[in-house]
Amino acid sequence: MIKTKITIFFLIACLLINISCSSAPKNPQDIDVLRSQAEFWLKTANIDAGQGRFENALSQLTDAKKNAILADDISLIIRSCLSRGNVLYSMGRTDDAFAEWNRAITEAESYGDSELLSVSRIFLSRGNLLTGRTQAQTVLSDVTRESSNIKTNKLYIAFSWQVRGLANRALGNYPEAEKAFKNSLDIHEKEKNMENTSYDWYMIASVRSLAGNNPSALDALKASLAIDRRIENSWGLAATYRAMGDIHKKTGKQKEALAFYIRAREIFSAMGNDYEVTEINKRLEN
């Protein structure tokens, strides 16, 4: 069975936050030094997080949030909180992550942007799902309801489909889960959002593997791998190679599994991610 790399979803969502800005059009007379710097930090933090440099990412996101507060830019505060929550979760600081997501909801409520409010609630629902704080059926119902408020931003719509895919997968509704991820995939392909396209294929592979369709799962992983190689997504490459190792191990192909694990470990090692290297070594020992 593929071990879902939850961290990928949180890092991919950081990118969605960065490119899915919901803010007022710029006026030529505006002074936006603070906002521009914050947007830059959001973008560079995502790059660092994608390479496993979580401390660097968190530092930049802290500065981004500070500038957003100084500029009193509510949209930017919300997006900074959502992104900080993702990185904090990836670092194992779950309570701090939930504090950021709840702050985003509070800000969105005061801001009066129904789309950002629903997106923030979906972020929180996803966290509740992945930590087991809320039952999958409740999350599915909540996200389906909130997604109806997302009308204009296609990437946010795709994000809601991803979370519905996760909820259906947790419920064992594999056909519905794959359909949800394919709906997300269609949007990301049209928008040429390669990071999320790769993630959609990765999750489709996970669903197929859980459903017992391992050959088809490998096909989906190959599609994910090709995209990650093209965009030089090191984290995605390593996670996909590991997933390939998991499937081959499950189907009794130990030699092939070993080769994929070694490749995954080599990439994680080059990234300086000792935790993931240790996880790979556990697989190699068993």
Image: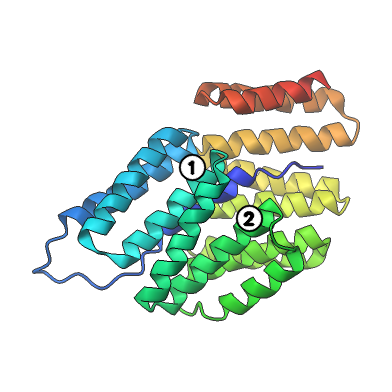
Note whether 242 is above or below 122 in the view shown: above
Q: Is residue 4 visible?
A: yes
Q: Residue at x 64, y 75 (%)?
A: 144
Residue at image location 36% in from the left, 64% down from the top = 21
Tag 1 near tag 2, CB within 8 Å:
no
Image coordinates of residue 257 in percent, x first then y, are 79, 28
Q: Which mark is residue 200?
A: 2
Give the image quarter of residue 160. Answer: bottom right
In this picture, is 140 found above or below 226?
below
Observer-nearest of 208 and 147: 147
Q: Residue at the location (55% across, 54% down)?
A: 196
What is the number of the mark on residue 199? none
For marks 1 and 2, give the one nearer the viewer. Answer: 2
Q: Nearer the viewer, residue 244 or 274?
A: 274
- Please determine whether, in this image, residue 5 is positioned above or below residue 101: above
Would you say 13 lies left or right of 278 here?
left
Element type where label 2 sits in the image: helix
Residue assigned mark 1: 231
Which secondary structure, mark 1? helix
Residue at the extreme top of the image, as rendered: 285
Residue 150: image location, x then y, percent: 50, 77
- Callout 2: 10 Å neighbours few (<14), some, many (20+)? many
Give the CA separation, mark 1 to mark 2.
15 Å
Residue 11 visible in this rendered orientation of the protein: no
Residue type indicated by callout 1: Ile
Q: Quadrant of the N terminus?
A: top right
Q: Position of residue 22 (x, y in %)?
A: 36, 69
The quadrant in which residue 166 appears is: bottom right
